[in-house]
Image (spheres, rainbow, N blue to C red):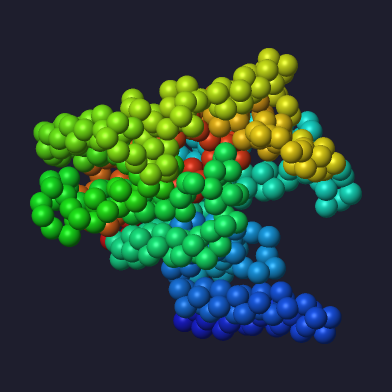
């Protein structure tokens, strides 16, 4: 009977995907009749996607962490690669679970730490149901709510997946390869992506290179710090990756790279003396670089921006950066004013009127503070979440953030160092710590990223070997 059930399941899956492919092909042909080439591109992309899902079989869940790394878009679909990965994960999980094709664990109790923030966002949305433009409303913002709901659903699903060491190895290499692919995609359309991603619309930065930082973080998690001071490929790769991160110009990524060895020193419980000695030597070299900057030589603009939080004679354009940032101070001031008006609910979520949005974006001003405020780009998690959803949301988020760091800390010795499972555990734990240390964030984008990272941690705890 069990063999017959397995045979039926094997036949059902291709039938389901075949019907889906037929529907897509029908829409594509219909579009071609009217000269719509996008539908053809969509058909090709979906054929590849369905083929990949069928090929992965029970490993389908790995598409989620992989697509989070690779920044690509399927023509005709209004979703990012990360969102597509989450949708594919949830859809396949429900389908395979309904047919009892996989062994999964019960819902992890640690998911409860994300529930308060999710619950409060739902409460605020019920009080002010915005983002209903598709039904004729003039308010938009549903995209942000979609990311929050999708991330929470991903957390609930992915935390039930059972993982193996072999799968961890695949994800390890997928993160490295995926970051390289993301850089290639960025280079192919750099002129557009750089302007969209840059906060200050600063074309002199090289933000697309910051993904090399993720590769460096992964290598730091996988190897002991002493292996990077030997004249081997690890030393030269680490130096090249560090210089690339500095050249990218992103201060947040630069800060992550600088503090990561100290975080890992405690999480690994190894090489504490070596880490401190290397840090002192690095500070000595960095000191010479900072003293010479602006006096003996001029570093590239993007490198100056990446290190502008350190004391040195920087370009005059960085007078408002570093420890004093007038741009962020103004946004934080506006966020605090929103909180004063309504400490409990803030501005009641992402209530954005379409006409006002068009007017704000069309304004020709040097710094569009209204545009950042309207989109929730407060550049601070605590004040931003409070301004969008009220102070309960801010405290709920830091309750989640502190709880996840404590979980990672308690489990820091739970698996053998050097294994791919341990490497991924350390890698995703770093993002939990970063979230607690760095104030920058967004009330929708931050939960989307952090809940997926936390879901991966919970999946790693479900060992199948």
Could you say where residue 72 lies in the image, as x and y percent from the top left?
A: 55, 63
| Nearer-the-camera pick, 30 or 331 | 331
Above or below residue 220? Residue 251 is above
Residue 407 drawn at (x, y percent): 36, 36
The residue drawn where x is 66% and y is 77% is: 41
- Is 168 situated above or below 434? below
Residue 53 visible in rendering: yes
Q: Is residue 206 left or right of residue 119?
A: left
Which quadrant of the view contains residue 293? top left
Q: Where 36 falls versus 211 (above or below)?
A: below
Which residue is outermost to the top? 340
**Quarter of the figure that contains the C terminus:** bottom left
- Residue drawn at point x = 73 percent, y = 29 percent: 348
Q: Nearer the viewer, residue 280 or 89?
A: 280
Please tell me in which quadrant of the rendered image residue 43 appears.
Answer: bottom right
User: In the visual, does 180 lie left or right of 186?
Assistant: left
Along the line of sight, the residue nearer the viewer: 305 or 123: 305
Residue at horizontal 31 percent and vertical 63 percent from the top: 169
Q: Position of residue 464 (x, y in %)?
A: 33, 60
Q: Does 87 sit above or below residue 293?
A: below
């Amino acid at each position: 009977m069990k063999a017959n059930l397995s045979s039926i399941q094997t036949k059902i899956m291709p039938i389901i995907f075949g019907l889906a492919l037929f529907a897509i092909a029908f829409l594509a042909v219909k579009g071609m009749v009217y000269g719509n080439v996008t539908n053809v591109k969509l058909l090709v992309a979906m054929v590849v996607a369905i083929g990949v899902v069928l090929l992965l079989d029970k490993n389908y869940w790995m598409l989620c962490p992989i697509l989070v790394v690779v920044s690509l878009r399927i023509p005709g679909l209004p979703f990012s690669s990360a969102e597509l990965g989450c949708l594919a994960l949830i859809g396949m999980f429900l389908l395979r679970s309904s047919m009892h094709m996989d062994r999964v664990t019960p819902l992890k109790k640690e998911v409860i730490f994300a529930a308060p923030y999710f619950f409060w966002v739902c409460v605020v949305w019920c009080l002010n149901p915005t983002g209903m433009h598709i039904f004729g409303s003039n308010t938009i913002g549903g995209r942000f709510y979609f990311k929050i709901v999708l991330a929470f659903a991903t957390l609930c699903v992915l935390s039930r997946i059972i993982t193996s060491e072999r799968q961890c190895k695949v994800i390890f290499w997928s993160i490295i390869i995926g970051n390289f692919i993301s850089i290639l995609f960025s280079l192919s359309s750099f002129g557009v992506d750089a302007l969209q991603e840059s906060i200050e619309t600063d074309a002199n930065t090289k933000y697309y290179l910051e993904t090399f930082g993720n590769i460096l973080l992964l290598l730091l998690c996988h190897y002991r710090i002493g292996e990077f001071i030997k004249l081997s490929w690890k030393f030269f790769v680490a130096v090249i990756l560090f210089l690339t991160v500095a050249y990218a110009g992103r201060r947040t990524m630069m800060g992550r790279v600088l503090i990561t060895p100290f975080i890992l020193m405690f999480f690994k419980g190894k090489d504490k003396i070596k880490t401190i000695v290397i840090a002192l030597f690095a500070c000595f070299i960095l000191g010479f670089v900072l003293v010479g900057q602006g006096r003996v030589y001029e570093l590239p603009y993007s490198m100056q921006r990446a290190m502008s939080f350190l004391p040195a004679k920087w370009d005059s354009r960085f007078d408002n950066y570093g420890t004093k940032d007038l741009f962020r101070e103004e946004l934080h001031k506006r966020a605090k004013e929103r909180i004063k008006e309504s400490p409990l609910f803030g501005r009641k979520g992402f209530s954005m009127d379409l006409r006002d949005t068009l007017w704000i974006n069309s304004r020709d001003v040097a710094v569009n503070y209204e545009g950042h405020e309207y989109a929730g780009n407060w550049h601070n998690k605590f004040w931003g979440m409070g301004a969008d959803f009220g102070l309960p949301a801010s405290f709920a988020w830091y309750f989640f953030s502190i709880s996840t760091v404590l979980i990672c800390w308690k489990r820091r010795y739970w698996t053998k160092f050097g294994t791919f499972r341990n490497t991924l555990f350390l890698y995703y734990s770093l993002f939990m710590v970063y979230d607690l240390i760095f104030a920058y964030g967004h009330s929708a984008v931050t939960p989307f990223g952090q809940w997926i990272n936390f879901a991966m941690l919970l999946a790693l705890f479900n060992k199948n070997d």
